[in-house]
Image: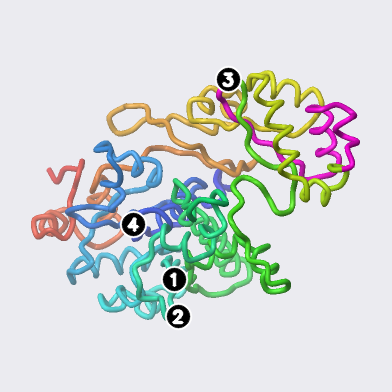
């Protein structure tokens, strides 16, 4: 029987915290994998207390579809249950500092001996090797060290960090496709399990591919240029008459000509200062001033309507209110509403990419701490309900919403 989801039958143990590792497990879970979330029995994943919101908002979407099974991995009894869970799993995602799991007796050597089919995804800030491997790794640090912040921001302003967990999300995407490749090699080509060394710094640095080759070949080190580009003109954000903003990019000659014709007619499109891309880059100040002046004379809706009539590329600078009201986002299920354990509807980002035959789905938001401890431990190990109750009393696990009656 063909499964409904591409990863049906795959079991993932998620022993990571915050973003990069849990996002990897989330994406696998979106497409059918059973994800067992191992977190500390007292405080849970740090994401439960992240931000200013007591409602665990980040937790709800990053840990959707997962089963919460708290275990104290400092304790031998917790380590033994962990080994039993991993022994029957396909994937383990973890983001402890290199060597931590080995100190607890549940490192790659031990776990792969128990399960030679295991794909172990080790997500860290700086990787399992190298002089920085023992440093605490957070996305903010990586966004700075990778070269991203250095080249981002206004020319006369400071290096600029993104307002989201960008490095973690990029790392999670790389980790997810690495996991699927490892499973494919194991299951299709008759290979074995293996571990994935996924460094947040590596993957963030990899997003700057053009910067790498340009510096290596020509010694060009990208400086901050705001919303402009060293390769494309016009390319910027512009304020409209109603104090809204739009973005344009004339990355091809035909699009650039359409933008110029929209803003200034044939006269501007044929102006020798702006005839070629090189001309436009050399005269970008004058070009930006002309476009900005035109934008200020029209509302955002008028600007977008006029640009679309001329088939000139443009996009509004949306805020969340714009996105929630946008029919395109709605039709693409970019925002979905999922009922939590209390029947409350929780809005969150949708599932993507979209597979035509085996689309992903979200069954529930991130669960309460220990919601699945009793059922998972008794189903997947030889512990009885009484054993699990004793472990809860000892602080090795916790039940959350379950009962031992």
> Separation of disc 4 and disc 2 at Cα?
22 Å
Q: Which residue is mark 3?
A: 242
> Do the residues under discs 4 and 2 have CB atoms within 8 angstroms?
no
What's the residue at 63%, 22% (across, down)?
300
- Dot 2: what SS? loop
Q: Give me the disc on residue 42.
A: none
Q: Give me the disc on residue 130.
A: 2
Q: Which residue is mark 1?
A: 126
> Do the residues under discs 2 and 3 have CB atoms within 8 angstroms?
no
> Separation of disc 4 and disc 1 at Cα?
16 Å
Q: Does residue 237 belong to the magenta stretch?
A: no
Q: From the top left corner, tell me how far across and down residue 302 is, in percent.
A: 69, 18
User: Quadrant of residue 60 in the image?
Assistant: top left
Q: From the top left corner, tell me how far across and down residue 68 is, in percent.
A: 29, 50
> Separation of disc 1 and disc 2 at Cα?
8 Å
Question: Image check: 254 left or right of 12?
Answer: right
Marks 1 and 3: which is nearer the front? 3
Of the pair 398 and 160, the residue shown nearer to us: 160
Q: Residues within 10 Å of mark 3 (few under 14, many from 20)?
A: few
Question: Image check: 388 left or right of 123?
Answer: left
- Dot 1: what SS? loop
Q: Which residue is mark 4?
A: 17
Magenta region, residue range: 243-272
Q: Residues within 10 Å of mark 4 (few under 14, many from 20)?
A: many
> Do the residues under discs 1 and 2 have CB atoms within 8 angstroms?
yes
> Separation of disc 1 and disc 3 at Cα?
45 Å
What's the residue at 68%, 67% (across, down)?
220
């Amino acid at each position: 029987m063909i499964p409904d989801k591409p990863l049906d039958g795959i079991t993932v143990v998620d022993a990571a915290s915050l973003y990069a590792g849990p996002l990897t497990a989330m994406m696998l879970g979106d497409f059918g994998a059973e994800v067992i979330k191992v977190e500390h029995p007292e405080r849970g994943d740090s994401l439960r207390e992240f931000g200013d919101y007591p409602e665990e908002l980040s937790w709800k979407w990053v840990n959707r579809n997962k089963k919460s099974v708290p275990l104290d991995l400092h304790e031998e009894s917790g380590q033994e249950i962990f080994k039993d869970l991993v022994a029957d799993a396909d994937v383990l995602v973890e983001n402890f500092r290199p060597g931590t799991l080995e100190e607890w007796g549940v490192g790659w050597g031990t776990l792969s001996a128990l399960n030679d089919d295991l794909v172990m995804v080790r997500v860290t800030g700086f990787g399992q090797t190298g002089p920085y491997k023992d440093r605490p790794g957070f996305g903010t640090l990586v966004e700075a060290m990778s070269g991203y912040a250095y080249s981002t921001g206004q020319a006369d302003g400071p290096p600029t960090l993104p307002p989201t967990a960008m490095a973690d999300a990029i790392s999670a995407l790389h980790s997810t496709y690495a996991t699927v490749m490892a499973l494919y090699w194991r299951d299709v080509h008759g290979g074995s399990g293996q571990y994935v060394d996924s460094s947040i710094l590596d993957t963030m640095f990899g997003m700057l591919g053009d910067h790498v080759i340009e510096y290596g070949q020509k010694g060009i080190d990208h400086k901050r240029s705001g919303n402009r580009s060293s390769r494309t003109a016009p390319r910027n954000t512009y304020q409209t008459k109603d104090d809204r903003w739009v973005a344009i990019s004339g990355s091809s000659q035909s699009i650039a000509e359409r933008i110029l014709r929209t803003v200034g007619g044939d006269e501007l499109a044929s102006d020798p200062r702006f005839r070629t891309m090189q001309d436009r880059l050399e005269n970008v100040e004058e070009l930006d001033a002309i476009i900005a002046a035109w934008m200020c004379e029209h509302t955002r809706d008028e600007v977008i309507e006029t640009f679309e009539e001329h088939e000139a590329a443009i996009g509004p600078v949306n805020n969340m209110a714009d996105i929630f009201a946008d029919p395109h986002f709605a039709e693409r299920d970019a925002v979905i509403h999922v009922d939590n354990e209390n029947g409350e509807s929780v809005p969150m980002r949708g599932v993507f990419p979209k597979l035509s035959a085996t689309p992903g789905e979200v069954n529930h938001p991130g669960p309460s701490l220990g919601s699945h401890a009793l059922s998972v431990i008794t189903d997947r190990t030889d512990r009885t309900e009484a054993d699990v109750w004793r472990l809860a009393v000892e602080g090795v696990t916790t039940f959350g919403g379950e009962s031992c009656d």
